[in-house]
Image (tube, rainbow, N blue to C red):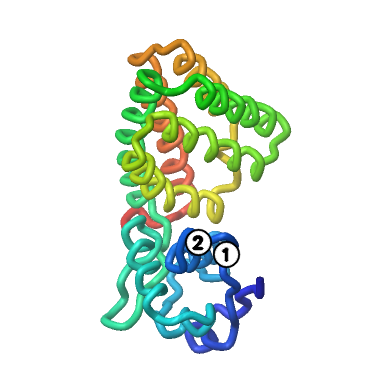
Amino acid sequence: MTELTHRTEESAGEASLGLAPRPDSLAMSVYNTIRQAIVDGKLPAASRVTEAGLAKQLGVSKTPVREALLRLKEVGLVESDGPRADRIVTPSAVRLRDAYEVREALEMKSARLAAERGHRDVLLAARHEAERTVVAADQRDFAAYRAADEAFHTTIARATGNARLARLIDDANAMIIALRQRDLPGIDASPVCASQHMAISKALLDGDVELSSKLMEEHVRSVGDNVVAYLTDHGAPQHA
């Protein structure tokens, strides 16, 4: 994949972005590529992008780029900046607070349904991911922690058997995952968070619906509070 090396709008047409491998669709491949460029800082916060410029970089028509940008707007990573351009969002305490509040409600339901009807093999897979977060947190391996953390929550969503709920959770988490990788130096990758994962996975395997939901609520809320506090303390804008 050729990296995006020029960050200004004027040079946007000169660099090229390679498409992400194994796409579910061309639009999804474009979405994943742009999203990763945002995470990596190749498309930095507040930078302007256009359908035409991105299409040229990716070597595709404007149609899949338009579809990808619409989804990126839905998940909160891109916002409109005039009739023919968009802008990469700048992280703010309010943006992240709102995202975590939505995530909290969705993941509480996910935990409840997973405890009620999740297949044991899938719940055991979730526990395995929880164990991986414990190891990664102890080793302060932030990349490994975040990969296991994302897999933990995704596996629980899969255990619900509700594909629509899983998609909503994926969309709700997209901005959180992208912005925390880019802007947060591992504050979410703590032994406390990992121990919360273990407690949640135990409640799920025990089939304890109420406890699973309660522990998930407390977990997502505490992580969200820590993220918002960090952004506030380090000078991030308070408002979108």
Circle 1: residue type: Ala
The quadrant in which residue 69 appears is: bottom left
The answer to the question of whether label 1 and label 2 lie on touching residues, with beta carbons closer than 8 A, is yes
Circle 2: residue type: Asn
Q: Residues within 10 Å of mark 1 (few under 14, many from 20)?
A: some
Residue at disc 1, secondary structure: loop
Q: Indicate the position of residue 105 as horizontal and vertical percent values.
A: 30, 34
Task: Find the distance from the CA under tag 1 to the CA under tag 2.
Answer: 7 Å
Q: Indicate which disc residue 56 carries.
A: none
Residue 237 position (above or below residue 13): above
* Residue closer to the observer: 17 or 8: 17
Residue at disc 2, secondary structure: helix
Task: Locate the N terminus and report the quarter of the image it occupies.
Answer: bottom right
Q: Indicate which disc residue 32 carries.
A: 2
Residue 103 position (above or below residue 35): above
* Residue closer to the observer: 129 or 198: 129
Residue underneath mark 1: 20
* Residue closer to the observer: 112 or 237: 112
Q: Indicate the position of residue 146 as horizontal and vertical percent values.
A: 58, 41
